[in-house]
Amino acid sequence: MDKLFIGVDVGTGSARAGVFDGLGRLRGAARRPIRTWHEEGGLVEQSSADIWAAVVASMREAMTKAGGAPEAVGGIGFDATCSLVVLDAAGGSLPVGPSEDPQRDVIVWMDHRAMDQTRRINATHHAVLTYVGGVISPEMETPKLLWLKEHRPDIFRRAGHFFDLADFLSYRATGSLARSVCTVTCKWTYLAHERRWDADYFHTIGLGELADEGFARIGTEIVDIASPLGTGLTAAAAAELGLCAGTPVGASLIDAHAGGVGTLGGRNAAGEAPADPAAQLAMIMGTSSCAMALTPQAAFVDGVWGPYFGALLPDYWLLEGGQSAYGAGLDYLVGLHPAAAAAREAAAAKDLGLLDFLEQRAVAMAGSLEAAARLARDLHIVPEFLGNRSPEADPKAKAAIAGLGLDTSLDSLVRLFVAGLCGLCYGTRQIVEAMRRRGVVIGTIVVSGGAARSPLLRRILADAADLYVALPETVEPVLLGSAMLGAVAGGHYPDLRSAAAAMCRTGEEIVPATGATAAYHAAKYAAYGALQQSERTVRRIMQDV
């Protein structure tokens, strides 16, 4: 019987499951929405029970579509956003905000309630911060834990377990309290290269009790990615999922990192041997974006998270840049335009999404993909709606637009859309340039995520960043990355490098333009930088008024 492997991806708005064979071919996939609560003060919360129910439903449907028997499943892997789950000692949910609703036990990654705690942690200049780009982000977990201690001390005291969401899913499936080296290294300040937590850091920032307890509430057993957890699926979890008890489950990944595992080190379109993953940049384009580079030695890049040892592939150091509002920023931007409602109606009439409709119209207006960027010649956008995650590590940064007029036509919406794409790509170029200044060698960007399916975005990215851009052969690289965890945990492949060589493939590459197009993007990139700095200048002028 041919083995099947299941990958589960919990993103910001949905839980998805994909069933793959041993060669990385997708056999079935399904999705279920998950609920999110937004409140004043930057609070964004979810429910772990709601998330698990969505996981169960999506996995059952994906297996039905795949036509696979439960006993054919050789392994399962989970990935999720870097959100914080808070449970009591018995595994019960605890409220993480003012709602007092115990079902709302998840602080979502994009929640910015811990801005003050973040500022105070950064003011310590602790040596541990060297491994998060010099500055910690409010999207990471120790600022959120400090907020809980200070604003919900009762909940902080009652909590028996603090999980990254991906580790919670593994715990819910297997009962294992082991944490993945990916989650705790990238988001919790675990020092993977030394295999330890830094007790002095926790005492310094005001979370000393976690150290005094021996880190029992945040993880005493840290395991490598794809390590088999416990004895596999518990009988209870197997019954819920419609699978066999004991099915292997691999130690989890953050969602963007699953995209990295599912794209790096695969064979190219010609079937040639896997590329050196250290020569590629994995870029996952979703609600936010994450740009991940691997290096054989530690490289320290200001404003870029890491270096993290073994957090993506064994024996490599990981650098992680990103843009906090990527797809979300583009959606918000086009929604501001007066013609957005009419454009949605026109898109629906053609059975298209709004962004796909705008892309088709942009290419038609310009005459080609390469020429489309020129539609935004006089309109410049820095789409930092949720701060600058990299390379400035400035969560207070805001978006800026120059060149707006009174035009409310559909064509002006198309120009705004293209200007937004250019702005996103120039933000990526800044991250790449910051890495290169520290000696990181990047030849190709391998893109994945929903936005990566856009031919126009890939074209602009190649030209704006002056790099080759490749798309994975699979339409679901994030799910594939998680499924690979199960393939390794179940012994189908000895390690992730071997799994990537067999299960991952990239398609044709886009070659960056030269000549007039390159000159155009160089000029527009300079304009982007000037506009970005003007926002910083205006903020400084107004900060003390």
Image (cartoon, rainbow, N blue to C red):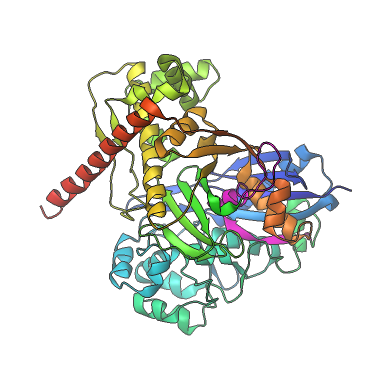
Q: Quadrant of residue 495?
A: bottom right
Residue at the bottom extreme, as displayed = 212
Residue at the right extreme, as displayed = 1
Foreground residue among 188 and 307:
307
Residue 487 in picture, x, y percent from top left: 74, 55
Residue 273 among magenta residues: yes
Instruction: State whether residue 160 appears in this view.
Output: yes
Residue placed at 48% from the left, 52% from the top? 441
**Above or below 179: residue 411:** above
Foreground residue among 396 and 258:
258
Residue 262 in picture, x, y percent from top left: 63, 48
Residue 538 among magenta residues: no
Residue placed at 72% from the left, 41% from the top? 62
Q: Which residues are magenta?
A: 247-275
Foreground residue among 241 and 409:
409
**Above or below 100: residue 515:** above
**Above or below 283: residue 252:** below
Q: Quadrant of residue 163?
A: bottom right
Q: Is residue 145 left or right of residue 312?
A: left
**Above or below 539: residue 234:** below
Residue placed at 76% from the left, 37% from the top? 65
Instruction: State whether residue 108 appears in this view.
Output: no
Foreground residue among 467 and 348:
467
Q: Is residue 226 left or right of residue 535?
A: right
Residue 420 in picture, x, y percent from top left: 36, 32
Q: Is residue 527 left or right of residue 95?
A: left
Residue 121 in picture, x, y percent from top left: 33, 69
Residue at the left extreme, as displayed = 545
Q: Is residue 380 left or right of residue 274?
A: left
